[in-house]
Amino acid sequence: MFPFSVCHARQTFPIQKCTKNKRYNDKMKKTVTERNIKVENASILIVDDEKAIVDMIKRVLEKEGYRNILDAASAEEAIPVVKANKVDLIVLDVMMGGMSGFEACTLIREYSDAPIFFLTARSSDADKLSGFAVGADDYITKPFNPLELAARIRAHLKRTYQSKETSSNQTYTYDYFTFSPQNAELIVGGEAVACSAQLLQLLQYFCEHPNVVLSKDQIYEKVWGYPSYGDNNTVMVHIRKLREKIERDPSNPEYIVTVRGLGYRFIPNPEGKRS
């Protein structure tokens, strides 16, 4: 489909064709060809110092109906773009000349809670955990399947829009924190707490399913919008970050507790509350 390679300084990474299996790729095609006007109006920023990658991603997204696509050749160029525009999703390369994608993500989070996808050849678990720790929402390794990238982008955007549209007027009030999905507002210990859109969606999912054991795969599929394919690190890192936001003692959580071997349970009224 894309019979060319994307060259880096020392290695050449071929853009993968759809070779996983027919069922998987048929599902990807079906997902990326679904039409949603709001999703296609989204503003997407692509940040990569490899022009071939930027051009390829733009062609894929334009083919899927997206029209508001921005690009930057470095992290330094990207930050002013984020400040000046309402960006709905960012595809951000990690290894660029100058500021790294990790550093850029930390700075971008000061101005935007838009989903950030890291795009990189660094595929170790440690690299992925570092990416999620600085605020990324997804992590895609090179070589990558263009249909999968498009499907992940669409799933994130659809999830974000659906969450905004279906958020009720209900405010969740607990002993230590209050959460309003409609206003995207989290108050912890009487103070407003900044939170990414992904963490707010994760918290909303827990609040909507109190006292229910939820598996990592189940959480990933509902919050991220597509199957996890065994990616448990994403859920684990985001739950750790959410605990840091809402728990008195994140190392000894009261609200989001681990059920060994099964997943997590949200306890709205934990016993032994501390004043």
Image (cartoon, rainbow, N blue to C red):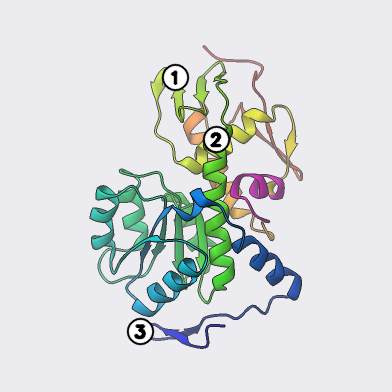
Chain-order first, disc 3 or disc 2: 3
- Give the residue at x 50% y 24%: 180
Image quarter of residue 31: bottom right
Marks 1 and 2, Cα distance to the nearest angstrom?
28 Å
Q: Which residue is mark 2?
A: 165
Q: Amino acid at mark 1?
A: Gly
Residue 37 versus residue 47 in the image, above or below: above
Secondary structure state at the residue bearing disc 2 = helix
Image quarter of residue 51: bottom left
CA neighbours of label 1 inside 10 A, class few (<14), some (14 to 19), many (20+)? some
Q: Position of residue 130 (x, y in %)?
A: 45, 56
Q: Amino acid at mark 3?
A: Ala
Residue 55 as seen in the image, left or right of residue 252: left
Q: Which residue is mark 3?
A: 9
- Give the residue at x 27% y 72%: 97
Q: Which residue is mark 1?
A: 189
